[in-house]
Image (cartoon, helix red, strand yellow):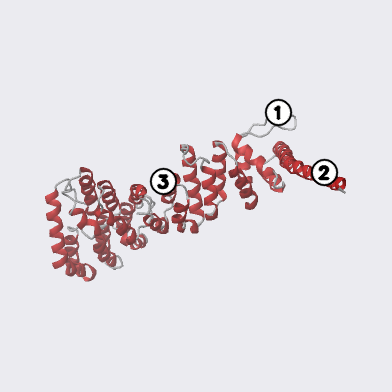
């Protein structure tokens, strides 16, 4: 009886040992199977390149291949060469072939490619592998792939520095994702909160490449979430007009709040941004800063005032202060009646009112709105004068009306409207309304 129990125990232990051995051998077997599959797909890829006579034929053959072709295509991108051909000789990778291979990989079903990249991210990819993976995510990725892009960019060691080329690659890939998927722009706060602080700067830079108004709001919405990022965000907001992005009043207000900050560096950055955004509403706060003890602040303030007003009073704090006080008195006592004369007056009355208005540069958008009403008049000389006034004001308020003036029968009106559009937008497009309609 005792001997039977011992025999049963030995049999059980032997079976357990066989199971353990089998389980230990399985990964190695799977690795051998995967390596064999990769080798076969490399041969398939090499044969497809050798036998295809045209890029179209190569695309067709690669599209017909199974999912096992994905690792081979990716390997070509990393190594920048093809596997050896059927005769064992290396195959030169031309620019045309390189393009076809990359596009063929990106045109595979997304689930195949992302599954491969997810598996790659669990390993310790080399820098070339990470760079290639970033390119692919940038080409096919959407908002849901932002975390994958982060994992492919960062080393496992949280303290390891990010290589400069990987930072650039992350910015370019994330920029492409944000441009392709509008939902991703609205989730940048989420990405910033969940991602590594080391990628916060590149994320802001990527968002800044998107010129939509939504992207501008998303940028300003990041202010205050990470104090270390605020200088970069203010710098990127300062560039919005230059890159052709629309700026909503909420963004200008978010920047303006930093003019009352305790850190001179942030005040200086906010002053510069307010000037670049042509924020009339910031003038009062800027004038109050002309005597600030920090030279950086004063320099930025004087530059901002020149941008907003168009006047070159330099670093003369007293002159800026007296000018602002005079402007405010004019707006309180005379501006309303004058703007009504611009909107409704004709002939000499309109001309006199227009010339007087042009002497004032505070709240230029409000003055421009009055001239925008005059663009629809039948008096072509008054329309031409309005175009000239809008050019000097530099306000984008009347861009739509100026574009319509490009269809005028009057060459003088078309010329004036064109010059105004070039001055306001910074674009040098032909004198046809279709060129400016966007």
User: In the structure shown, which secondary structural element does the residue marked by tag 1 occupy?
Assistant: loop
Which percent across, then down, holds residue 149?
53, 47
- Quarter of the image for residue 363 reads bottom left
- The image's mark for residue 376 is none
* Residue drawn at the location 60% of the way across and 38% of the way down: 77
Quadrant of the rendered image containing residue 329 = bottom left
Image-based side of 230 in relation to 88, left or right: left
- Residue 288 sits in quarter: bottom left
Residue designated by label 1: 89
Decide which of tag 1 and tag 3 comes sooner along the chain.
Answer: 1
- Residue matched to label 2: 10
Residue extending farthest to the top is: 89
Residue occupying the point 30% across, 52% down: 423
Please state if 61 lies on the left or on the right of 417 as rendered: right
Pointer 2 or 1: first along the chain: 2
Q: Assess whether mark 2 and mark 3 are in contact (beta carbons under 8 angstroms).
A: no
Q: Which residue is mark 3?
A: 201
Instruction: Measure the C-alpha gap from mark 2 to mark 1.
Output: 56 Å
The C terminus, quarter of image: bottom left
Q: Regarding mark 3 in the picture, which secondary structure is present there? A: helix
Q: Position of residue 274 (x, y in %)?
A: 28, 53
């Amino acid at each position: 009886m005792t001997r039977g129990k011992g025999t049963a125990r030995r049999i059980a232990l032997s079976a357990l040992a066989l199971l353990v051995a089998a389980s230990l051998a399985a990964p190695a077997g799977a690795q051998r199977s995967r390596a064999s599959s990769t080798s076969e797909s490399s041969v398939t890829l090499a044969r497809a390149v050798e036998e295809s006579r045209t890029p179209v034929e190569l695309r067709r053959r690669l599209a017909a291949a199974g999912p096992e072709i994905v690792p081979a295509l990716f390997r070509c991108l990393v190594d920048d060469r093809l596997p050896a051909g059927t005769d064992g000789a290396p195959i030169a990778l031309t620019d045309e072939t390189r393009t076809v291979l990359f596009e063929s990989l990106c045109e595979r079903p997304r689930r195949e490619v992302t599954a491969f990249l997810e598996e790659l991210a669990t390993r310790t990819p080399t820098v070339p592998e990470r760079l290639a993976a970033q390119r692919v995510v940038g080409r096919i990725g959407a908002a849901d792939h932002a975390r994958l892009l982060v994992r492919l960019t960062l080393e496992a060691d949280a303290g390891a520095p990010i290589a400069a080329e990987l930072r650039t690659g992350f910015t370019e890939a994330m920029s492409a994702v944000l441009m392709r998927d509008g939902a991703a722009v609205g989730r940048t706060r989420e990405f910033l909160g969940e991602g590594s602080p080391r990628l916060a700067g590149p994320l802001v830079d990527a968002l800044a490449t998107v010129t939509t108004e939504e992207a501008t709001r998303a940028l300003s919405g990041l202010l205050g979430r990470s104090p270390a990022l605020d200088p970069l965000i203010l710098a990127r907001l300062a560039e919005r007009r230059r890159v052709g992005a629309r700026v909503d009043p909420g963004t200008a207000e978010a920047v303006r709040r930093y003019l009352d900050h305790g850190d001179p560096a942030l005040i200086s950055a906010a002053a510069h941004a307010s000037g670049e955004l042509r924020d009339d509403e910031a003038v009062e706060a800027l004038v109050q800063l002309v005597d600030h003890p920090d030279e950086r602040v004063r320099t930025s303030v004087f530059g901002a005032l020149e941008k907003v007003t168009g006047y070159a009073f330099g670093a003369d704090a007293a002159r800026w202060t007296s000018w602002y006080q005079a402007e405010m008195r004019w707006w309180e006592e005379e501006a309303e009646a004058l703007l009504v004369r611009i909107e409704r007056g004709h002939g000499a009355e309109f001309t006199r009112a227009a010339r007087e208005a042009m002497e004032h540069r505070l709240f230029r958008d409000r003055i421009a709105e009055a001239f925008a009403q005059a663009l629809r008049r039948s008096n072509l000389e008054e329309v031409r004068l309005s175009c000239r006034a809008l050019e000097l004001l530099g306000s984008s308020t009347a861009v739509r009306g100026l574009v319509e003036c490009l269809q005028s029968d009057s060459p003088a009106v078309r010329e004036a409207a064109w010059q105004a559009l070039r001055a306001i937008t910074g674009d040098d497009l032909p004198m046809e309304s279709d060129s400016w309609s966007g």
